[in-house]
Amino acid sequence: MKVWHRVEPIGIIDIGSNSIRLCVYDIAHRVPVPLFNEKGVCALGRGLGSSGRLNPEGVLAARAVVGRFVALCRAMEVERLDILATAAVRDAEDGGDFVADLEQRHGVRIKVLSGGQEAKMAASGVLCGSPDADGIVADLGGGSLELVTVQGGKSGRHVTMPLGLLRLSEASGEDRGRAGEIVESRLSGISWLEEGRGRNLYAVGGAWRALARICIAQTHHPLTVLDNFSLDAKEALSLLDLVSAQSRKSLDKVPGLSRKRLPGLPLAALILERVTRAIEPSRLVFSIYGMREGQFFRRLPERMRAEDPLLSVCRRMAANNSRFPEHGDEVLAWMAPLFPNETAHAARLRHAACIVSDIFWNEHPDYRAEQAFLRILRLPFMGVAHDDRAAIAFTIYCRYQGAEDSPAVARAIQLLDEDSLRRCRAVGQALRLAHTLSGGAPNLLRQTRLVAEQRYLVLEMPSENPAFVLDLDRAFDRLARSLGCEALLARRIS
């Protein structure tokens, strides 16, 4: 009987200028997968620029929302509750009174982040999903815009500006030309933006995630997953110019957009367009990870922060769904002789595919290949570029002998070039042979050996072990052909 272990949840309440959100995460794992996620729109920062105070209606709404969230966390028995307040509370003259009132009402502690802390936490969120992020993180909220450099797994220079959607809309009188002038004026005073030239610009925040949906629709991109969707900077500028000039009626036709986001999208596009022009990155990358995930990441033990997020996700899936989770690493080592000159990047993707190669064993055989492909392709959390996501999914699809004329598959693998497709087929066929040979059970593959000898692929198996008395001709032949071998041999060893 399976023994269920209690998760170790932490709750994070983010009191923003426009919305308040609660995320509850299981901190026993490296990747921030929300156990619970809910948002309340309170618009605390509405009118702050003119009055210097929080929106009175928003304060009333915030009391109710925070009260609900605290009660939910207590009912969920979270190990720790972190409540963070950002730009609106930080800048309002009555922000301190607002915090004191909430703390007294609900018996909690609230941390008001400085602009620098908010920027660095957003950077930590991006690094949580993409440890190799290199460039500048831009985090847009309702009250502020934060910019911070990232490189080598660390954040660097940072700045916070009152250019959030609510603040900029009020300051510009909702005049697009005036808004552009304000943004350009603020950005022109930041001397270090040139550090982002030719690197990546990481866009963080709900409004910019909504823009990603529009860009995906406009470019007919094969994947609708938002995380790590990226565009060449020149293409991004063209799309952002288009979106910033659109009417609400036009934007309303884009599938998947929240109607509450629509009014602010043209302004959000304008801000991102100006930031992109000022930095001159090579690519614009949209990230689903931001400040809350940064706080989660900082709560992890150092050993967990050092884990590869992609492999961590895969191991978690294997632990929950594979028949023999430890088999993945054995398969990885077994097929290594077939790929002697692979890059570290290619090895990482192969490792991920090996780990998840058996998690779909209980799907209906008629649909197993396509279910596996779509599940991996559409996971909301992986921390990899879209072409890498497609490569892992297609590898597993080949492992299950899926037909390549499937419309869903054919569309997604447009992201892969011919060399990548050939490699995915080869790894997929090697996975199929490994599971056919071993039945998925551990400790059998290490008794065999694959050897590539010039034009020949050789499989060595012990002659005395009855576990290896089976017909492998078809699976072995497919693997050899995927590797470009003209002939193959199988021999027994004593």
Image: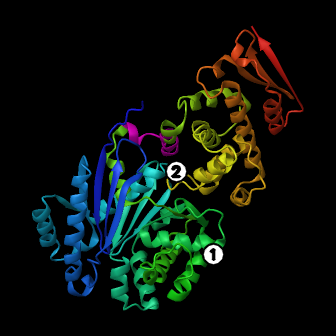
Q: Which picture quadrant has residue 427?
A: top right
* Badge 2 density bin: few <14, some 14–19, many ≥20, Cα 10 Å: many
Looking at the image, which residue is at 59% across and 50% down? 376
- Furthest residue toward left: 104
Residue 26: horizontal and vertical position, in percent? 35, 47
Q: Where residue 382 is drawn, which disc sits there?
A: 2
Residue 80 drawn above or below residue 470: below
Q: Which residues are magenta?
A: 303-316
* Badge 1 density bin: few <14, some 14–19, many ≥20, Cα 10 Å: few
Report, in whole angstroms, how far the alpha carbon at label 1 lies from the one at label 2.
24 Å
- Specify whether residue 314 is painted magenta: yes
Can you identify the residue that label 1 sits on? 218
Looking at the image, which residue is at 83% across and 28% down? 473
- Specify whether residue 364 is painted magenta: no
Going by the numbered disc 1, the residue's amino acid type is: Gln
Residue 211 drawn above or below residue 10: below
Looking at the image, which residue is at 42% across and 86% down? 179
Going by the numbered disc 2, the residue's amino acid type is: Met
Classify residue 253 as left or right of residue 18.
Answer: right
Q: Quadrant of the N terminus?
A: top left
